Amino acid sequence: MPIITQAKSAAVVIDDAKCIAEKGCTVCVDVCPLDILAIDEGRKKAFMKYDECWYCMPCEADCPTGAVKVNIPYLLR
Amino acid sequence: MTDTKTEIIEADILVIGGGTGGPMAAIKAKEANPGLKVVLMEKANVKRSGAISMGMDGLNNAVVPGYATPEQYVKEITVANDGIVNQKAVMAYATGSFPMIQYLDKLGVKFEKDGSGEYNMRKVHHMGTYVLPMPDGHNVKKVLYRQLRRLQVAVTNRYMATRLLKAPDGRIAGAVGVNTRTSDFLVVKAKAVVLACGAAGRLGLPASGYMFGTYENAANCGDGYAMAYHAGAQLANLECYQINPLIKDYNGPSCAYVTGPFGGYTANNKGDRFIECDYWSGQMMLEFWRELQSGNGPVYLKMDHLAEETISEIETILHTNERPSRGRFHERRGNDYRKRPVEMHISEIGFCSGHSASGVWVDENARTTIPGLYAVGDMASVPHNYMLGAFVNGGIAGRDAAEYCANVELTDYDEGYLAAEQERVLAPTRREDGLTPNEMEFKTRRLVNDYLEPPKVTAKMEIAQRRFAEIRDDLSELCVRDPHELLRALEMQTILDCADMAAAASLYRTESRWGFYHLRVDHPETNDDEWFCHTVLYKDEQGRMAHAKREVDPYVVAVEADEMAAYHQLRVKTPAAAE
Ligand code: SF4
Ligand code: SF4
C-alpha cells in the first residue's frame, strides 16, 4: 500500500526569535529521549518533527535561551 | 538507506541502557577495576534518558537504619508480592540500600533531611517506613553523567541494541546495535553484558489513544525483555503485569507517595477513603478497579482538605521533579489541588518489576540464566525495586561483571546470526511501500488493551494470540522511509514480542494471584498447591515460546501466615459505619 502523510499539531513550540540553532546549538535535539526534534536546515531553527512527545521537558529545561515551550499534546489536554 | 556501515569494537563490559541502573553498573564496574574497558550503549542520550530523565521526587523503598531493617523490608516485599519472591535477591537490595543512599548523597544527589542532618523518612507502605522525599531530586542524571565522565566510561548515544550475540558455548559474546539517526551498525564484542533497558512501558495503549502518553518513558518499550528472550534467557512472572493508578489522561503518577505523608489520599466520588494503604500493589489496584465497577467512581486523589502551606509544598515537589509537566496539565484542566480533587484512573498494562514483579530472571548477583549476561532495574525480576533498586542492583551487576571478566576471554559470535539480524533490521528499509511502524504499533497495542487487560479471560487471550500472529505475518509489509522510522519499526517488533509474552505467560498460570495484576476470570482462586512458584518463560531449542515452574527458594526471612495476609485486607472495613 502506498504511504500518505497526514497533518498533526505540534505540541512542542520553538520561539524562532530566541532559538540560536544557526550558531550551532542543538541542545534540545540532543537531549530529547524520543528523538523527535530536529533543526530545519533551511531556516536554521529547531522544530518538532514527529508527534511522539512524552511531555517530559528536558528540551525546555536545557535550552540555553528559553526558546522551547512544551505543551501537553492535544489528545491529553 | 541501503548502504549502512558496520563498525566492530571490543570491550570488557557492555552495558545496554543509560538510564538509572545502567550508568550505576558502569560506574561500579569501573570503580572495581579502572583498567576495564566499559562501553555504555544508549538509545537516546545518557544526559536525559530513561525513567528519571527529569530526576525523581523521592525514594519509595529506602531501608534506612532506625526506620527499617533489611529483614523488615524483605518481609514487606514478600507479603506485597504474595510470597512469590526470590528473597535472597530482595535481601541483596535491602542491605545495599543504605550504602547506596550514602554513595549518591556523596556524589551530590539531594535527599530531604531534618534540622540535624538526618534523613526525613515518611511512611506510605502498609507495615514499615521506607519513603524518603527528594524535593531537590532534579539533578540525579547530571550527577550520574559527571561520574561516568570522571571514570571514563565510553558512551555511545543514539544506538538501539537489537540483539545479543552469543558464543558457541552459550555464554554472552556481545550485542549489535543500530544508530537511530544513520542506521549504521555497531557491534560490541564483550565478555559480559548488562541489560538495563527499563520497563516494557509501551505495551498497552493509553486510554487517550495517544501512543506516547505512557506512564514509563516511552523510549522504554521492552527492548531488554525482547533481547533477553531471543537470546534464550528466562523471564519470570510476566503475568504479574504493571498496572498503576495514575492521573487520568496525563497518565503520570499523581503521586500518592509524595502526597500521602502530607495527608492526601485516594478517595471515591463521595470523598471517602476506600483503601487503607496507597502503596501500589496488585491488591490495591483490585480495590481501585472494584470501586470503579461499583459506581462509586471516579476515583480521586484528594488534597483539598489540606492547609495552604502543605499544598504549595506538594506543588513545588510535584511540579519540579520527575514529571514537571504535571502542573501544566492541571492548569489547562482548571485542576487546583485546593479546590478540586484530581481524577485518577487505571493505567494500561506493561511489564516492570520495578513496580510489580515481571522481569528477566536474575539471582542475588543480578545474573540472568545466560553466563555473562546480567539484568538490572525495571526489567530485572527483583520485585518492587524502583529507582533505588535500579541503582543498587546496577552496582551489584557492575561489580560482579568486573570480577567475571577477570576469568574469561573475549569470544567469537556466530557470523551467520549477525548477518541474519542485520537483514531483519534493514528489511523495512528495502520496501517502497507498505504498512507504517506507527499503525502496526497502534494496532498491536490496541489489541493488548482489548484482550489482555485484567480481568483476564482465557478465550480473549487466545484471540489475542491469533491476532498477534496475523500482525507478525504483516511484518513482511512493514516499511520505513528514514532511520527514525526504522527505530520505531524495531520498537514495534519489540512491543509485539512483549505482547506475545504477556498473553502466553498469563495463560500459563491457571490461577488468580497478585490482586488485579493476574485476575483470571476462569481461575478465580489462588491455588498455592499448584502455583506457589515463579513461572519462567523462555525460547526453547526449536524457537518456540516455552514455560516452566521455578520453585521459590527457601526464605531467608521467615514470614508468618497471618502476616502474609496483610496486603489482602486493604479495603477500608465497616463501610456502613463510614456512611
Ligand atoms: S536548545 Fe534552544 S536554542 Fe538550542 S536549538 Fe534548541 S531551541 Fe534552539
Ligand atoms: S518534552 Fe520530552 S519528548 Fe517532548 S520534545 Fe521535549 S524532550 Fe522530547
Image: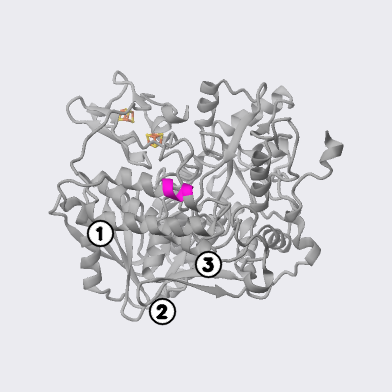
Residue lying at 21% horizontally and 47% vertically, measured from the top left: B434
Most extreme residue toward the right, as rendered?
A: B577
Q: Which residue is mark 1?
A: B186
For discs 3 and 1, the disc positioned in front in the rendered view: 3
The type of residue carrying mark 1 is Leu
For discs 3 and 2, the disc positioned in front in the rendered view: 3
Q: Which residue is mark 2?
A: B407
Subunit of label 1: B
Q: Earlier in the sequence, mark 2 or mark 1?
A: 1
Subunit of label 3: B
Question: Residue B158 versus residue B401: which sits nearer the camera?
Answer: B158
Quadrant field for ligand 1: top left
Q: Is residue B310 above or below residue B504?
A: above
The type of residue carrying mark 3 is Tyr
Specify start and end residues of the magenta stretch as a single range: B446-450
Subunit of label 2: B
Residue lying at 74% horizontally and 34% vertically, measured from the top left: B263
